[in-house]
Image (cartoon, helix red, strand yellow):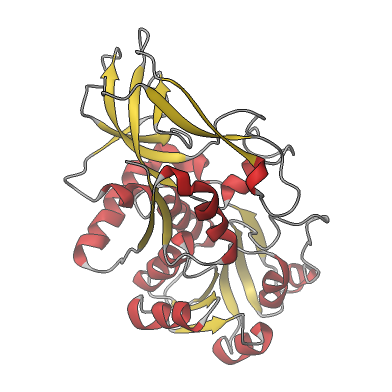
Amino acid sequence: MSNATINHQFKLAARPNGNVKASDWSHTNEPLRAPVEGEVVIQVLYLSLDPAMRGWMTDKPSYIPPVGINEVMRAIAVGKVTASKNPKFAIGDHVTGLLGVQEYAYSNGQGLTKVDPKLAPLPLYLSTLGMPGMTGYFGLLEVGQPKAGDTVVVSGAAGAVGSVVGQIAKIKGARVVGIAGGADKCRYLVEELGFDAAIDYKTENVAEALKTHCPNGVNVYFDNVGGDILDAVLTRLARGARVVICGAISQYNNTTPVKGPANYLALLVQRATMTGIVVSDYYDRAGEAAMVMAGWIQSGKLKTREDVVDGLDAFPQAFDMLFSGANNGKLVLKVA
């Protein structure tokens, strides 16, 4: 065991209505106990902050049950085993899994994956080599199926998933147009990540910009935002286009019903498809994706950027950054 005796945690105090408020969280602590037979204790080092967490707070049917009131907020994290009564894990092992927003987590080993900090910095296992990277990899390649010469459009393009999607599309020989908010993010997409063009939705008319940058239509659209931007891209679909629905961050804090795609008949006209991607469907192939992407990172074909916020106490403010667009790159909270 570590020398710590108290475990600080953030629990869900209330189901948010609209934007998440400080009162929706409770900052609690409990005594740290020794592991029981088959259990490990993990010191949480880095927490992944992801838009999906907002959906986990809502008591609506979804691909995963909601977080319960007064339960530790669910979050993917990477940490170090500090005590073990499980033969599969030794003290000092680094692992990733759903460890929650807390300083220490208990696990029976199910859902834990060992990671090697010598192969890559730990935050990378929460970004490109973690859930966001896997989402982008399988969502684009398995659902979007880009071919060389295709035009691929990505929304939320400067985020953890979108930046991976655009770069992989370039690796596969596609022409890539990113949609992001702000001149700095758009410059980053083109000048650092190699996108062919970027559209600033905060200052540009997205529908008009798509006509300019996608004169022959959009073959693959990877959607992270939903709402008006999804509607705008639907009007530019090429024949046989594939629309990948990954997320809808523009809708997550709505107090009114989710705004669906008004232009969905474009799917009929263009014989296009719209398919959802949930990364857990591909977890049995995570090793394959990690090896491929690690190779791309080492060769310089795939660049990563993590935005690391320091301290567990900063969790509520850091979580809000996801929805204001204040983060640059994958948002990670450094706990220890």
Q: Is residue 262 left or right of residue 188?
A: right
Q: Quadrant of the C terminus?
A: top left
Q: Quadrant of the N terminus?
A: top left
Q: Quadrant of residue 14?
A: top right
Q: Position of residue 87 (x, y in %)?
A: 26, 14
> Front-most of 175 and 64?
64
Q: Position of residue 149 (x, y in %)?
A: 44, 79
In the orientation shown, which residue stands out farthest toward the left?
A: 118
Residue found 77% across the figure and 66% down from its top? 261
Q: Quadrant of residue 85?
A: top left
Residue found 25% across the figure and 61% down from its top? 297
Q: Is residue 223 left or right of residue 122?
A: right
Look at the picture and state if 186 lies above or below 301: below
Q: Position of residue 129 (x, y in %)?
A: 34, 50
Q: Position of residue 120 (x, y in %)?
A: 22, 50
In the orientation shown, which residue stands out farthest toward the top?
A: 37
> Front-most of 132 and 91?
91
Q: Quadrant of residue 108?
A: top left
Q: Is residue 5 left or right of residue 90?
A: right
Look at the picture and state if 196 lies above or below 248: below
